[in-house]
Image (tube, rainbow, N blue to C red):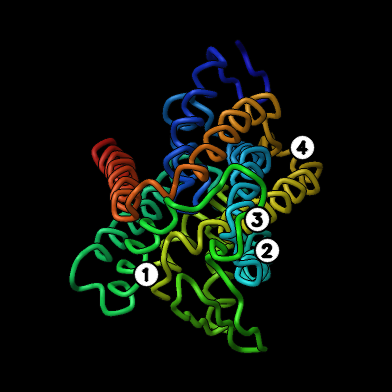
Amino acid sequence: MYFPVSGVDVNPIIPFAVSFIISFFTSMGGVSGSFLLLPFQISILGYTSPGVSSTNLLYNVIAVPGGVYRYIREGRMAWPLAWLIIAGTLPGIFIGVIIRIRYLSDIQNFKYFVGAVLFYLAVRIFYDLTPLAGKKITRAAALERGFQGKANQAPADNGSPPEKFRFIRTINVSWNKYTFEFYGELFSLNIISLFLFTFMIGILGGAYGIGGAAIIAPFLLTFFGLPVYAIAGATLTANFITSIAGVLFYLLIAPFYKTSGISITPDWFLGIILGLGGFMGIYLGAATQRYFPARIIKILLAIISLFLSLEYLLNLYLNK
């Protein structure tokens, strides 16, 4: 099947299957999988114009709601955290889109950028799996192990879970501090620090075309020491909202770039196919997350990120 907007010619089953497989595993870590789908579109499908970023955001818009629904249904949605992330990333997303179009429209420059982002994610996740990670990370890992055992007893398929299985509970939200309880332990975040970091991550996410969750999730795990089971719903929700804003912004500014010959609007048909595969993958991934050890989820994300980053960076270096 030929997709005229992107120039991609591929059997639609392939992008559907790839997005399904990627999103199934990445959604367990609170990530939609768009950070891996973008290299797939560039390197395998040959979609190299800036429109690949807006198509990637369109994928998030279609794919993410299934996972958000599952996390809400299972009592694992930290709503204040989701809205705080959105407040920081939204303005950053708009800046990132402009950077992508103005300074990263050349595919070689964009590949350097993608490779660097993926490499950082991989190294940071691997580091947090070592004893050097610090007390916060060790504490979160212990909670994750305890949660997995208890969560496997929770009914997840018949409406809302009983109160004893509502694992996340908001304790306090003030102008500078957010505190919530997860699995009997309290976690506090400085709201100002969170806003500043998510704003910068929003810029990266807007330029990359991922909504920012792929960077925010490891950030919350490492710098704030939060458990992966507690943040997945919030990061996916934020990813959904910011991706909608990103797609709309691309559409809004597209008329100003018509004469430049740069294609920045999404490939709607390709994005929908990717999104439908992602919707099914994210829904099933969110539903089965509690059966997978958090350490395995993190290792899987890190290995995939490292492999892709080294492939990009080494190939670009060797082909200079």
Q: Vertical placement of 14 versus 160: above or below?
A: above
> Do the residues bearing badges 4 and 1 touch, measured as CB atoms within 8 Å?
no
Which mark lies nearer to you, 2 or 1? Answer: 1
- Horizontal relation, residue 238 to residue 147: left or right: right
Residue found 32% across the figure and 51% down from its top: 293
Return the residue at label 1.
222
Q: Residue at x 31, y 59 (%)?
A: 125
Are the two marked residues, 2 and 3, in contact with CB atoms closer than 8 angstroms? no
Q: Quadrant of residue 117?
A: bottom left
Q: Secondary structure at mark 1?
A: helix
Query: What is the CA distance from the residue labelled 4 to the residue labelled 2?
Result: 25 Å
Q: Position of residue 53 (x, y in %)?
A: 59, 42
Which three-letter amino acid code belongs to the residue tagged 2?
A: Leu
Element at badge 3?
A: helix
Return the residue nearer the eye: 160 or 235: 160
- Specify which label sits upstream in the sequence, 2 or 3: 2
Give the labeled residue for mark 3.
98
Residue identifier under label 2: 90
Estimate the spatial distance between the alpha carbons at disc 2 and disc 3, rounded to whole Å.
13 Å
Q: CA distance from mark 4 to mark 1?
A: 42 Å
Q: Which residue is mark 4?
A: 258
* Disc 1 and disc 3 in contact, CB within 8 angstroms: no
Near mark 4 (Cα within 10 A), the count class, few <14, some 14-19 or many ≥20, is: few
Mark toward the start of the polypeptide (2 vs 1): 2
Kindly indicate the quadrant of the structure image that contains residue 79.
Answer: bottom right
